[in-house]
Amino acid sequence: DVKVTQSSRYLVKRTGEKVFLECVQDMDHENMFWYRQDPGLGLRLIYFSYDVKMKEKGDIPEGYSVSREKKERFSLILESASTNQTSMYLCASSFFLRGRAQYFGPGTRLTVT
Amino acid sequence: SQQGEEDPQALSIQEGENATMNCSYKTSINNLQWYRQNSGRGLVHLILIRSNEREKHSGRLRVTLDTSKKSSSLLITASQAADTASYFCATDVGGDKIIFGKGTRLHILP
Protein backbone atom coordinates (compact mmCIF):
# COMPACT_ATOMS: atom_id res chain seq x y z
CA ASP A 1 0.00 0.00 0.00
CA VAL A 2 1.11 3.51 -0.76
CA LYS A 3 1.84 5.44 2.34
CA VAL A 4 2.05 9.21 2.51
CA THR A 5 2.92 10.64 5.89
CA GLN A 6 2.90 14.21 7.12
CA SER A 7 5.04 15.42 9.98
CA SER A 8 2.26 16.78 12.17
CA ARG A 9 -1.50 16.32 12.45
CA TYR A 10 -1.99 19.58 14.32
CA LEU A 11 0.25 22.60 14.48
CA VAL A 12 -0.14 25.98 16.17
CA LYS A 13 2.19 28.79 15.18
CA ARG A 14 2.39 32.50 15.77
CA THR A 15 2.12 35.19 13.13
CA GLY A 16 5.50 35.85 11.54
CA GLU A 17 7.00 32.46 12.36
CA LYS A 18 8.63 30.34 9.68
CA VAL A 19 6.74 27.07 9.36
CA PHE A 20 7.89 23.82 7.80
CA LEU A 21 5.42 21.11 6.80
CA GLU A 22 7.02 17.83 5.81
CA CYS A 23 5.62 15.10 3.60
CA VAL A 24 7.16 11.70 2.89
CA GLN A 25 5.95 9.00 0.48
CA ASP A 26 7.23 5.46 0.24
CA MET A 27 6.17 4.43 -3.28
CA ASP A 28 8.91 5.99 -5.35
CA HIS A 29 6.40 8.36 -6.93
CA GLU A 30 7.78 11.01 -9.25
CA ASN A 31 5.14 13.59 -8.47
CA MET A 32 4.19 15.26 -5.21
CA PHE A 33 1.64 17.94 -4.43
CA TRP A 34 0.68 20.37 -1.68
CA TYR A 35 -2.94 21.49 -1.33
CA ARG A 36 -4.79 23.55 1.18
CA GLN A 37 -8.39 22.87 2.02
CA ASP A 38 -10.77 25.49 3.36
CA PRO A 39 -14.52 25.29 4.00
CA GLY A 40 -16.47 26.35 0.95
CA LEU A 41 -13.36 26.55 -1.23
CA GLY A 42 -12.47 22.90 -1.65
CA LEU A 43 -8.91 21.82 -2.40
CA ARG A 44 -6.60 24.35 -3.95
CA LEU A 45 -3.18 23.45 -5.33
CA ILE A 46 -0.30 25.41 -3.83
CA TYR A 47 2.75 23.80 -5.48
CA PHE A 48 3.69 20.54 -7.10
CA SER A 49 6.92 18.81 -8.02
CA TYR A 50 7.51 16.33 -10.83
CA ASP A 51 11.09 15.47 -9.99
CA VAL A 52 13.80 16.09 -7.42
CA LYS A 53 14.65 19.78 -7.20
CA MET A 54 11.87 20.61 -9.66
CA LYS A 55 8.82 22.59 -8.62
CA GLU A 56 5.89 24.29 -10.27
CA LYS A 57 3.46 26.85 -8.91
CA GLY A 58 -0.12 25.82 -8.48
CA ASP A 59 -3.12 28.10 -8.16
CA ILE A 60 -2.22 29.83 -4.88
CA PRO A 61 1.57 29.88 -4.38
CA GLU A 62 1.78 33.32 -2.78
CA GLY A 63 3.23 33.20 0.72
CA TYR A 64 4.56 29.66 0.26
CA SER A 65 7.70 27.97 -1.00
CA VAL A 66 8.64 24.33 -1.38
CA SER A 67 11.69 22.13 -1.32
CA ARG A 68 12.30 18.72 -2.82
CA GLU A 69 15.84 17.56 -2.17
CA LYS A 70 15.00 13.85 -2.17
CA LYS A 71 12.46 11.97 -4.23
CA GLU A 72 10.46 10.78 -1.25
CA ARG A 73 10.26 14.09 0.61
CA PHE A 74 8.41 17.29 -0.27
CA SER A 75 8.40 20.20 2.14
CA LEU A 76 6.07 23.17 2.26
CA ILE A 77 7.47 26.33 3.81
CA LEU A 78 5.55 29.31 5.08
CA GLU A 79 8.22 31.99 5.19
CA SER A 80 6.28 34.27 7.53
CA ALA A 81 3.05 32.72 8.71
CA SER A 82 -0.08 34.84 8.65
CA THR A 83 -3.54 34.23 10.09
CA ASN A 84 -5.01 33.76 6.61
CA GLN A 85 -2.80 30.70 6.23
CA THR A 86 -4.76 28.91 8.94
CA SER A 87 -6.01 25.87 7.06
CA MET A 88 -5.84 22.13 6.50
CA TYR A 89 -2.77 21.25 4.43
CA LEU A 90 -2.81 18.06 2.41
CA CYS A 91 0.14 16.41 0.71
CA ALA A 92 -0.31 13.93 -2.13
CA SER A 93 1.82 11.87 -4.47
CA SER A 94 1.26 10.08 -7.76
CA PHE A 95 3.19 8.04 -10.25
CA PHE A 96 2.10 10.13 -13.21
CA LEU A 97 1.05 13.76 -13.23
CA ARG A 98 -2.20 12.82 -14.93
CA GLY A 99 -4.32 9.80 -15.54
CA ARG A 100 -3.57 8.13 -12.24
CA ALA A 101 -4.78 8.38 -8.68
CA GLN A 102 -3.24 10.75 -6.20
CA TYR A 103 -2.46 9.31 -2.78
CA PHE A 104 -3.00 11.66 0.12
CA GLY A 105 -1.47 12.02 3.53
CA PRO A 106 -3.67 12.48 6.62
CA GLY A 107 -3.34 16.25 6.56
CA THR A 108 -1.92 18.89 8.89
CA ARG A 109 -4.32 21.30 10.50
CA LEU A 110 -2.35 24.50 10.93
CA THR A 111 -3.55 27.32 13.12
CA VAL A 112 -1.73 30.65 12.98
CA THR A 113 -2.49 32.96 15.89
CA SER B 1 -20.21 26.93 -12.10
CA GLN B 2 -16.62 25.92 -11.67
CA GLN B 3 -14.91 22.97 -13.31
CA GLY B 4 -15.98 19.94 -11.32
CA GLU B 5 -18.95 20.92 -9.20
CA GLU B 6 -20.70 18.35 -7.04
CA ASP B 7 -24.40 18.23 -6.39
CA PRO B 8 -25.96 18.12 -3.88
CA GLN B 9 -23.72 19.90 -1.40
CA ALA B 10 -25.07 17.71 1.38
CA LEU B 11 -27.10 14.51 1.51
CA SER B 12 -28.58 12.53 4.39
CA ILE B 13 -30.02 9.07 3.86
CA GLN B 14 -30.99 6.07 5.94
CA GLU B 15 -28.55 3.21 6.28
CA GLY B 16 -29.21 0.63 3.62
CA GLU B 17 -30.49 3.12 1.04
CA ASN B 18 -28.62 4.08 -2.09
CA ALA B 19 -26.81 7.40 -2.33
CA THR B 20 -26.32 9.25 -5.58
CA MET B 21 -24.19 12.32 -6.07
CA ASN B 22 -23.37 14.16 -9.24
CA CYS B 23 -20.49 16.08 -10.71
CA SER B 24 -20.77 18.57 -13.55
CA TYR B 25 -17.86 20.12 -15.36
CA LYS B 26 -17.35 22.77 -17.98
CA THR B 27 -14.54 21.73 -20.34
CA SER B 28 -13.64 18.47 -22.03
CA ILE B 29 -11.81 16.00 -19.84
CA ASN B 30 -9.31 13.17 -20.23
CA ASN B 31 -10.62 11.39 -17.17
CA LEU B 32 -12.59 11.97 -14.01
CA GLN B 33 -11.84 10.63 -10.54
CA TRP B 34 -13.87 10.29 -7.36
CA TYR B 35 -12.35 10.58 -3.89
CA ARG B 36 -13.69 10.11 -0.38
CA GLN B 37 -12.62 12.10 2.68
CA ASN B 38 -13.54 11.07 6.17
CA SER B 39 -13.82 13.92 8.65
CA GLY B 40 -10.47 15.55 9.34
CA ARG B 41 -8.52 13.09 7.23
CA GLY B 42 -6.85 12.94 3.82
CA LEU B 43 -8.60 11.98 0.61
CA VAL B 44 -8.82 8.39 -0.56
CA HIS B 45 -9.04 7.56 -4.24
CA LEU B 46 -12.16 5.57 -5.12
CA ILE B 47 -12.37 5.21 -8.87
CA LEU B 48 -11.13 6.71 -12.14
CA ILE B 49 -13.20 6.74 -15.31
CA ARG B 50 -11.69 7.72 -18.64
CA SER B 51 -13.41 9.89 -21.20
CA ASN B 52 -14.06 6.93 -23.50
CA GLU B 53 -15.76 4.92 -20.74
CA ARG B 54 -19.40 5.21 -19.76
CA GLU B 55 -19.62 3.18 -16.58
CA LYS B 56 -17.33 1.59 -14.01
CA HIS B 57 -17.96 -0.47 -10.93
CA SER B 58 -15.97 -1.07 -7.80
CA GLY B 59 -17.66 -3.05 -5.05
CA ARG B 60 -20.73 -1.04 -3.99
CA LEU B 61 -19.68 1.93 -6.10
CA ARG B 62 -20.94 2.64 -9.58
CA VAL B 63 -19.69 5.60 -11.57
CA THR B 64 -21.16 6.82 -14.83
CA LEU B 65 -19.83 9.41 -17.21
CA ASP B 66 -21.83 11.30 -19.82
CA THR B 67 -19.42 13.42 -21.83
CA SER B 68 -22.22 14.90 -23.93
CA LYS B 69 -23.76 16.37 -20.77
CA LYS B 70 -20.39 16.94 -19.12
CA SER B 71 -21.49 15.13 -16.02
CA SER B 72 -20.68 12.13 -13.86
CA SER B 73 -22.54 10.39 -11.10
CA LEU B 74 -21.38 8.28 -8.17
CA LEU B 75 -23.83 5.73 -6.82
CA ILE B 76 -23.20 4.02 -3.50
CA THR B 77 -25.51 1.07 -3.03
CA ALA B 78 -26.68 -0.36 0.29
CA SER B 79 -25.13 2.48 2.27
CA GLN B 80 -23.36 1.83 5.55
CA ALA B 81 -22.45 4.08 8.47
CA ALA B 82 -18.83 3.95 7.34
CA ASP B 83 -19.83 5.68 4.09
CA THR B 84 -20.41 8.90 6.02
CA ALA B 85 -17.82 11.21 4.45
CA SER B 86 -17.31 13.93 1.89
CA TYR B 87 -17.02 12.88 -1.73
CA PHE B 88 -15.09 14.84 -4.33
CA CYS B 89 -14.84 14.61 -8.06
CA ALA B 90 -11.60 15.61 -9.74
CA THR B 91 -11.25 16.33 -13.44
CA ASP B 92 -8.19 15.97 -15.63
CA VAL B 93 -8.44 18.52 -18.42
CA GLY B 94 -4.85 18.23 -19.61
CA GLY B 95 -1.91 20.19 -18.32
CA ASP B 96 -0.16 19.27 -15.12
CA LYS B 97 -2.89 19.03 -12.55
CA ILE B 98 -6.34 17.76 -11.74
CA ILE B 99 -9.07 20.04 -10.46
CA PHE B 100 -11.11 19.11 -7.42
CA GLY B 101 -14.69 20.12 -6.79
CA LYS B 102 -15.95 21.35 -3.44
CA GLY B 103 -17.50 18.04 -2.48
CA THR B 104 -20.75 16.46 -1.38
CA ARG B 105 -21.13 15.76 2.35
CA LEU B 106 -22.89 12.42 2.81
CA HIS B 107 -24.39 11.49 6.17
CA ILE B 108 -25.73 7.99 6.73
CA LEU B 109 -28.44 7.91 9.39
CA PRO B 110 -28.74 4.80 11.60
Image: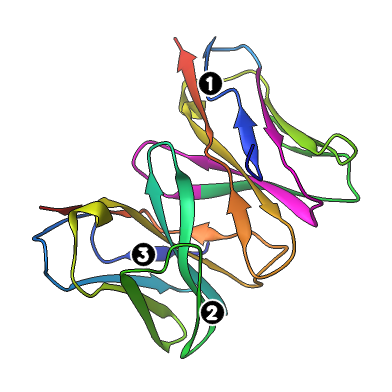
Which percent across, then down, holds residue B37? 47, 41
Element marked by disc 2: loop
Q: Is residue B93 left or right of residue A23?
A: right
Magenta segment, which residues? B19-43
Front position in the image: B7 or B64: B7
Element marked by disc 1: loop
- Residue at image position (40%, 49%) is A37
Cα gap from disc 2 to disc 1, whole angstroms: 34 Å
Cα gap from disc 1 to disc 3, whole angstroms: 28 Å
> Which of the two labelled residues, at mark 2 and mark 3, occupies the earlier sequence position?
3
Same-chain status of marks 2 and 1? no
Front position in the image: B17 or A93: A93
Check if mark 2's residue and mark 1's residue have beta carbons within 8 Å. Answer: no
Label drawn at residue A28: 2
Is residue B27 one of those drawn in magenta? yes
Label drawn at residue B80: 1
Amino acid on which disc 2 is placed:
Asp
Amino acid on which disc 3 is placed:
Thr
Q: Is residue A75 left or right of residue A109?
A: right
The residue under label 3 is A5
Label drawn at residue A90: none
Eye-nearest disc, 1 or 3: 3
Q: Which chain does the numbered disc 1 sit on?
A: B
Vertically, is B39 above or below B33? above
Is residue B103 one of those drawn in magenta? no
Same-chain status of marks 2 and 3? yes
- Residue at image position (47%, 50%) is A43
Same-chain status of marks 1 and 3? no
